Image (cartoon, helix red, strand yellow):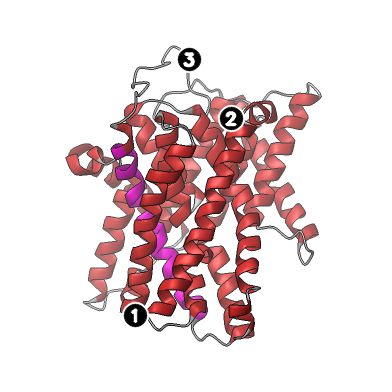
Amino acid sequence: MLELDFYGTLVAASLVLLLGRGLVTRVKFLRLYNIPEPVAGGLVIALVLLALRNFDIHVRFDTSLQTPLMLAFFATIGLSADLASLKKGRRIVLIFLAAVTGLLLVQNALGIGLATALGLDPLMGLLSGSISLSGGHGTSAAWGATFTEQYGLPSATELALASATFGLVLGGLIGGPVARLLIGRVKTPGQGHGQAHLPKGFEEPDTERLITPISMIETLALIAISLQGGYLLQGLLSGTAFELPTFVCVLFTGVLLRNGLSLFGLYQVFEREVSVLGNVSLSLFLAIALMSLKLWDLAALAMPFLILLTAQTLVMALFAIFVTFRVMGSNYDAAVLAAGHCGFGLGATPTAIANMQAVTQRYGPSQIAFLVVPMVGAFFIDIINVIVIKLYLALPFFSAL
């Protein structure tokens, strides 16, 4: 057993990102289909570790940095959210939210239908639906325990977490190809678009931003306040009907902090710097998450369950192409949104952002996509997903179980 400590894991994550960049730069297929750099590098390392297990060589990472990086990323999302801009784009947010809700319903209906047809417990269909895919690892762990304790479904948590791992991998792989297919039908802004004005958000992570040491300290302080405020808020809501995941509370605190300071004229958030720190946190989080994937858990899944997840992946791609892209306007922004939807419809919001960055780095910025996806994918989807899951469990079909 080779165990890497905190510093060794940080070094490994940095090397994964450099490997991913090298692969995307040199391998035409990865560049052509807009595969995110953390996904490319992380999957290569995960596959290497899977191969090493055959020689009884096990590598364990210290993932204690993973959660703080994820929360820091969501803090920067909140600090980037200008409520005035969101108000102007509320129609787009509502339309995208409707599309996302539609996918949740489709995922669960497909999961239950296929599970029944394959002779599996229909609860396993729900596990392979919005619980593990749109919900991710956190939702999978929570509902897996519930299914075992209340419904007597054995190994529900393990199945749900393995499904979430499958979704995280595929969510990072299909977003780019879906976007490339759709972009062939629309006019793109081009890489040189708007270079006279530095981008504010996350859509062009490689663009240089002018920053200073004192502004960096100020932005770090805002992120730290968002993290502390998020933990306090989550503690207050814990055990109540309004309980939310910690990352949602952190994001919400960031939104309040940014807009409160602006409303009272106390401070204007330095968006260029927020985006730099957000991109660093996002990249390192994804690198650690992907290189730590236990791909051998996927090998342990039964063939019927793999059929379920493969069908869900195909339906996600088709939904993004024929529903998300069309209802969002069938334009370049809609194509970027479709790539993002693949990311969090199968994996998680960070994967969605990475998908969109891979597209916008090549074809040009999409401020609408980076305004809509973080708010819907990180905030609203968890709330709606809980409602949808409970609605399905309330059906007479499940009440009889």
**Point 33% across, 68% down: residue:** 295
Mark 3 highlights which residue? 197
Q: Position of residue 308 (x, y in %)?
A: 38, 70
Q: Nearer the viewer, mark 3 or mark 2?
A: 3
**Point 51% across, 86% down: residue:** 154
Q: Nearer the viewer, mark 2 or mark 1?
A: 1
Mark 2 highlights which residue? 216
Q: State which tag comes first along the sequence, 3 or 1.
A: 3
Q: State which tag comes first along the sequence, 2 or 1.
A: 2
Q: Quadrant of the N terminus?
A: bottom left
Asked if residue 175 is among those painted magenta in the image, a careful observer would answer yes
Q: Position of residue 159 (x, y in %)?
A: 45, 76
**Point 80% across, 58% down: residue:** 236
Classify mark 2: residues with Cα within 10 Å, few (<14), some (14-19) or many (20+).
some
Classify mark 3: residues with Cα within 10 Å, few (<14), some (14-19) or many (20+).
few
Mark 1 highlights which residue? 302
Up-down relation of residue 2 to residue 291 (above or below): below
**Point 41% across, 60% down: residue:** 167
Q: CA distance from mark 3 to mark 2?
A: 20 Å
